[in-house]
Structure formats: C-alpha cells, structure tokens
C-alpha cells in the first residue's frame, strides 16, 4: 500500500507541471478559441531567458520575476504581431500560424543558445520528508505549492478585479463586451501575456527535472494537451485537475503495467485524449456546445 501511495505522490508532482502548461493552453483557448501548439516552445524560450539571467550571476528568484515579466510582454507581442492579423480567418490558417510559431521559436532557441544540453538550477532544496513509509521530496512539495499559488492568483484576478471581470466578459461574449466599452483587442493581448507567463512557470519547474535544451517541452506539451482535453478546454480548474489525473495515471501505468514500463508511458496521454474525445468531447469539467437549430 505504501508503494502505491508513493507512486501517487510522484504522479501528483509530475501532474502539477502538466497542469500549469495545460492551464496556459486553456487560457488562450478561452479568450481567442485558438489551440496554441507553440505553447510549450514559448515556455521553453522563457526558461532559457531565466537560465541566461542566472548564468549571469542573478539570484534565482529575481531572475524568475524578470523572466515572467519578459514572458508576459512577449505573449502580448505575439498576439499583436502574429495572431491579430489572422483574427477571424479560417481555422486552418490559425493552426498554420501556431505551428509556424512552434518551428520558429524552437529554431531561434537553438540558434541563440545552441542545442547543447544545459543544467538548470533547482530553486527547491534537496532532501525529502519521510513519514509512514512515504517519501515526499521538497522539490515535489515546491512544485505543488507553486502551481497552487498560480491557481489562487488567477482565481483572485478573475473573480475580484476589474481587469479579470473584463477578461471573463471577453471570453464569454466579445461582441457584447465591446458594446459596454471593454477594449477587446487589448484584453485578448492580456490573455496571451497571461498564458505565456503561466507557461513560463511550467518550463522553469520542469527544467531542473530534465535538462535544458530546445526540445525539452515536446513531451510535456503532449501531456498538457491530454490534461486540457480531459479537464475541458473551457475550464481552467478542469485543466489543473486533468493535469493531476494524467500525472498519476502515467506514473501508475509505468509502475504497474509491465507492458508499458518507462519507455511507453508517452502512450498514456494519447490514450486519454482518444478516450475523452470518443466518450465526452467537452471534457470532465467542460460545457457541451449548444447550438440553436
């Protein structure tokens, strides 16, 4: 039993990382209806920026704050320069722009920092808490606390601020929001900036567990898509719940399904995506689309 609970704890730590990137995917989808395939690469690029700050001798937490600020500005810039011109265009056009952004950011990171693997500093201390035969690493606890804090801050933003209320109005009905004086264009840019910031948190959390290199977020993006699909692309809370479920499912499958092991765990999110699309396309916490005939 202790071994089973230990696997769940480790799965929750991994799932929290998937949840943060899934949350970024959901934020952009809520505001613009766009599935951003470049979200993982944007997070990777932000992580390189944080690494550059720390490599220059800057304290980690100061580097984190500056990186989040740069990520926010970068997300707004991407919306203004790349997304705004294709607003209202055919869905395939938007997908092509998103995939093009994926390729460009990946290549730019390799050109600037090379494709050599780099170490990324872990902001959390080593060691673990042991109780009842269970071991909980400080890194796992730190990841869960950071993702919980991000969720709490987003809740306060959307529920208790004027900006958040405007963003919710735009996400629900941009035409009506425009009629009551909300600047929809700038609100969409804020949404992209916010999503880029949340995605940057995901990249910075996962980099110490892996190695920093331009392709490090490719696998994480698949898990994040599975989390967003499971929880519902129109539910931020669902994205977080979906991320935790996917993380636990992946860990348990790797530990107890002998034919999967550690090599085929990447198939777990793909099975989840397929199963959800077949059974409940809107996800566990999403709302089914209703169209008037």
Image (cartoon, rainbow, N blue to C red):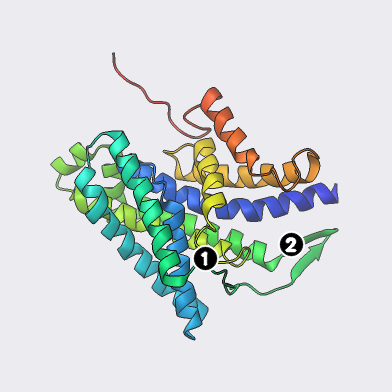
Around disc 1, counting alpha carbons within 10 Å, would you say few (fewer than 14), some (14 to 19), or many (20 or more)? many
Residue that mark 1 sits on: 204
Residue 171 falls in image quadrant: top left
- Asked if residue 212 is positioned above or below residue 278 in the image, the reply reads below
Q: Is residue 194 visible?
A: yes
Residue at 75% x, 68% y is 128
Quarter of the image where the C terminus is located: top left
x and y, in percent, of residue 254 in the image: 74, 45
Numbered label attached to residue 12: none
Q: Where is residue 42 in the image (x, y as percent from the top left)?
A: 41, 58
Q: Is residue 139 left or right of residue 288?
A: right
Report the residue at 57% width, 61% height from top: 206
Alpha carbon separation for disc pair 1 and 2? 20 Å
In this rendered view, identify the residue nearer to me: 227 or 78.
Answer: 78
Give the x, y percent position of residue 96.
Answer: 33, 42
Q: Mark 2 points at which residue?
A: 136
Of 130 and 221, the residue lying toward us: 221
* SS assignment at label 1: helix
Q: Could you tell me which residue is drawn at 69 percent across and 43 percent down?
A: 264
Secondary structure beneath disc 2?
strand
Mark 2, other Cα within 10 Å: few <14 / some 14–19 / many ≥20: some
């Amino acid at each position: 039993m202790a071994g089973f609970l230990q696997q769940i704890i480790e799965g929750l730590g991994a799932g929290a990382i998937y949840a943060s990137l899934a949350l970024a995917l959901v934020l952009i989808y809520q505001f613009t209806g766009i599935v951003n395939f470049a979200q993982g690469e944007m997070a990777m690029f932000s992580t390189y920026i944080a690494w550059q700050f720390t490599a220059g001798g800057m304290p980690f937490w100061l580097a984190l704050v500056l990186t989040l600020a740069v990520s926010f500005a970068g997300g707004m810039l991407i919306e203004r320069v790349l997304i705004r011109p294709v607003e209202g265009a055919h869905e395939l056009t938007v997908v092509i722009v998103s995939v093009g952004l994926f390729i460009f950011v990946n290549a730019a990171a390799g050109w600037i920092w090379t494709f050599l693997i780099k170490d990324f500093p872990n902001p959390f201390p080593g060691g673990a808490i042991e109780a009842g035969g269970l071991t909980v690493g400080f890194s796992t606890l730190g990841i869960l606390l950071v993702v919980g804090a991000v969720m709490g801050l987003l809740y306060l933003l959307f529920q208790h601020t004027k900006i958040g209320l405007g963003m919710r109005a735009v996400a629900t009905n941009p035409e009506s929001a425009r009629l009551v004086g909300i600047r929809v264009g700038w609100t969409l840019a804020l949404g992209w900036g916010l999503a880029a910031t949340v995605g940057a948190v995901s990249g910075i959390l996962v980099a110490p567990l892996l190695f920093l290199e331009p392709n490090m977020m490719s696998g994480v993006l698949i898990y994040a898509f599975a989390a967003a699909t499971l929880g519902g692309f129109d539910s931020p809370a669902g994205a977080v719940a979906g991320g935790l479920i996917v993380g636990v499912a992946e860990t348990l499958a790797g530990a107890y399904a002998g034919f999967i092991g550690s090599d085929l765990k990447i198939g777990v999110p793909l099975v989840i995506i397929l199963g959800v699309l077949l059974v409940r396309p809107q996800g566990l916490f999403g709302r089914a689309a209703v169209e008037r005939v």
